[in-house]
Amino acid sequence: MRQRRSRLSALAFVVALLTASIPVQPAAAVTTTDVSQRYLIRATLDVAAGRLDAFEELELTNRSHRTIDHVNLSVVPRGLDYFSMDDVVVDGEPVATEWTTSINLRVPLADLAPGASTRIEIGFSLDVGRSPDAFTARTSVENGVFSFGQWFPILSTEHEIYGLGDPQISFSADVIRLELETTTSLPRDAVACPGLESAPETSGRSWICDSADVRDFSFVVNPRFQLTIRDADGTEIRAYTETVSGAATADLAADGLIGLEAAYGEYPWPDLVLAEVGSGGGFSMEYPRMIHLTRDKVADPYVVYHEVAHQWFYAQIGNDQQTEPWLDEAFADFSARYLMGIGENACSTRPVDSPVFAWEAGTTTGGDWTSCDGYFHAVFYQGTAFLNEVQDAMGEEGFFSAMREWVEDNQHGFVTGRELLLHLRRSTDADLLPIYERYLDDPDPRAPRLPIDLSLFSRSRPMPE
Ligand SMILES: [Zn+2]
């Protein structure tokens, strides 16, 4: 005891010396993504000019335990040269914002204490053109169809746009509401959006869409849209198409939704909207309650199922799509093939959990999407091979039961691969580690390793004394 006390006092002396010699540093900048978000966006679309003028009000409440002094907003259209904005106003005062990457807008806040709220106002415009291939189903205009995806400033982590994979990282908002006006009269079905609250009787200039518990919001405008409606066990499916009948699209979406509800648990929103964009090429794109389909894939079973599966893996359960794209893409690919009863077709030898940056790409173009060594084969198809092996080891019922628990525990949240890998190991007596080691670059490094008895952590068994 005596010896311990003298050691402690010696340590205190050293600490005192060290701290005395350290100059006082300015407090480090503090931010968080642990906030409540409510978005109201009033926008006017000029179809002839290809321009959207918008005014965004974002109410944030700090849900973290720390006082924060800024937030990061992701503005993907700035990377495509579509974006311009007025002064940003916080709680009634203009503030000095900073672009810290080509798409990251850093907005300073007067110290925002835990539980406190603030209001950010941004007036901005989008002059939309035809986007590079990876972005044609995001924000783009082609063949007279306006697609708006990843189109407004949204709370995010600081990151850079990248031409491979998906450059958006977002967190569930309480509500995202769009009040849209058009400069000319358009038919009622010209605007495809989730949560359609009001629209003109037959034609007009005003639409309101209101979407709750979503991590993003998108819409598509095409005056020539035809609307097809289906009921999928109580969820309204609305398919907006121009070049083909929407019947096949809506039927596929309804089949996919019902099949995936059985696999992963109930779809939590009242509607799911699918809209054909103007581009024939590029990649279709998922948003919460909304799917943008390229013209060559409007009734493609794989693509529709893949994007419906993203309503669970991405829309309900978020992840960092740049550093861990497999968390949504491998599950979307696996789920589409599960619904279709077809196997994977992977020829990659790269790790399933590769970040998008494992492949070279420009900010908005390029990247090896399709070769054997490319992004799709490694992350999507090899991801399916990995999940099939995990399912074989756990048994089909064990695997899907664990996945339903995963969705329920993390609904509207944000997850990491480490948490998923640990959850799967805790959910089974099978030894998954050899499978992890075969497919993953860094299999679960911080998770308890064998011979630690994982059954001690199992939720289905009582904790030992
Ligand atoms: Zn996908």
Image (cartoon, grey):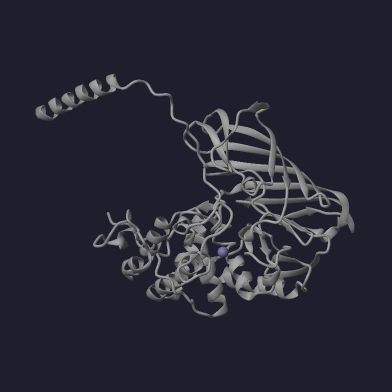
Q: What residue is drawn where x is 38% and y is 63%?
A: 460
| Picture quadrant where residue 297 is located | bottom right
**Residue 123 vs residue 13, the one in the foreground:** 123
Is residue 408 depicted above or below 394 in this figure? above
Place of residue 254 in the rendered image (x, y in percent of width and height, measured from the top left): 67, 71
Q: What residue is drawn where x is 65% and y is 33%?
A: 119
Report the side of 195 relative to 1 (left or right).
right
Is residue 275 depicted above or below 106 in this figure? below
**Residue 254 vs residue 187, the one in the foreground:** 187
Q: Is residue 459 visible?
A: no
Q: Is residue 59 visible?
A: yes
Q: Residue at the far left: name it.
A: 3
Place of residue 69 in the rendered image (x, y in percent of width and height, measured from the top left): 52, 30
The picture quadrant for ligand 1 comes to bottom right
Is residue 8 depicted above or below 131 in this figure? above
Report the side of 292 relative to 115 (left or right).
right
Q: Quadrant of the C terminus?
A: bottom left
**Residue 392 vs residue 282, the one in the foreground:** 282
Place of residue 262 in the rendered image (x, y in percent of width and height, measured from the top left): 56, 71
Q: Quadrant of the N terminus?
A: top left
Place of residue 459 in the rendered image (x, y in percent of width and height, measured from the top left): 39, 60
